[in-house]
Amino acid sequence: MSARRRARQAALTGLYQWLVSHEEPAVIQVHVEEQEVHAGCDQPHFEALLHGCIAQATTLDAALARHVDRPTADLSPVEHAALMIGAYELANCIEIPYRVVINEAVELTKSFGGTDGHKYVNGVLDKTAADLRSVEVQAARAARS
């Protein structure tokens, strides 16, 4: 498993904890860093995801809200965390292709979420990508035609 994927898994663990307990991000970071899920992760990316998602939670939820069928607070914490990571990477990590962002969020949800949660995450992030990276998405769709 790549260091980036490990960073996403560690961030998912931390965001899950934050969504459930609303503990301070620094406390959550220390807790996650003590767990096996953190071993071998891309530390700068983990920190960017964890702290960036928490700091931008309102903005990320607003971007996602256009495409979810219920308030984000009512989503499963795993799906919500995976969607936050995906939306954060779409908005802030333009060096990562949008399809990679979506795929990574889907894989997180397959590993840690409910039975069909990955399908939901895929659909929401596909629409969110069209909002946040319209030029890249349109170019990719045109290339497939």
Image: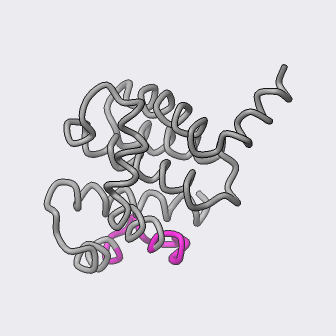
Q: Is residue 38 magenta?
A: yes
Q: Residue at x 76, y 28 (%)?
A: 141
- Place of residue 44 in the rendered image (x, y in percent of width and height, measured from the top left): 53, 77
The residue stretch that appears in magenta: 33-47
Q: Residue at x 49, y 44 (%)?
A: 105
Q: Residue at x 70, y 49 (%)?
A: 97
Question: Is 143 positioned to the left or the right of 127 in the image?
Answer: right
What secondary structure predominates along the stretch shown in magenta?
A: helix
Which of 64 and 4 lies nearest the eye of the viewer?
A: 64
Q: Quadrant of the image for the C terminus?
A: top right
Which of 24 and 59 lies nearest the eye of the viewer?
A: 59
Question: Is 34 positioned to the left or the right of 66 in the image?
Answer: left
Question: Is 93 positioned to the left or the right of 62 in the image?
Answer: right
- Place of residue 26 in the rendered image (x, y in percent of width and height, measured from the top left): 27, 80
As drawn, the residue found furthest toward the top would be 145
Q: Is residue 122 above or below residue 15?
A: above
Which of 3 and 92 lies nearest the eye of the viewer?
A: 92
- Place of residue 102 in the rendered image (x, y in percent of width and height, measured from the top left): 57, 41
Q: Is residue 137 above or below residue 9?
A: above
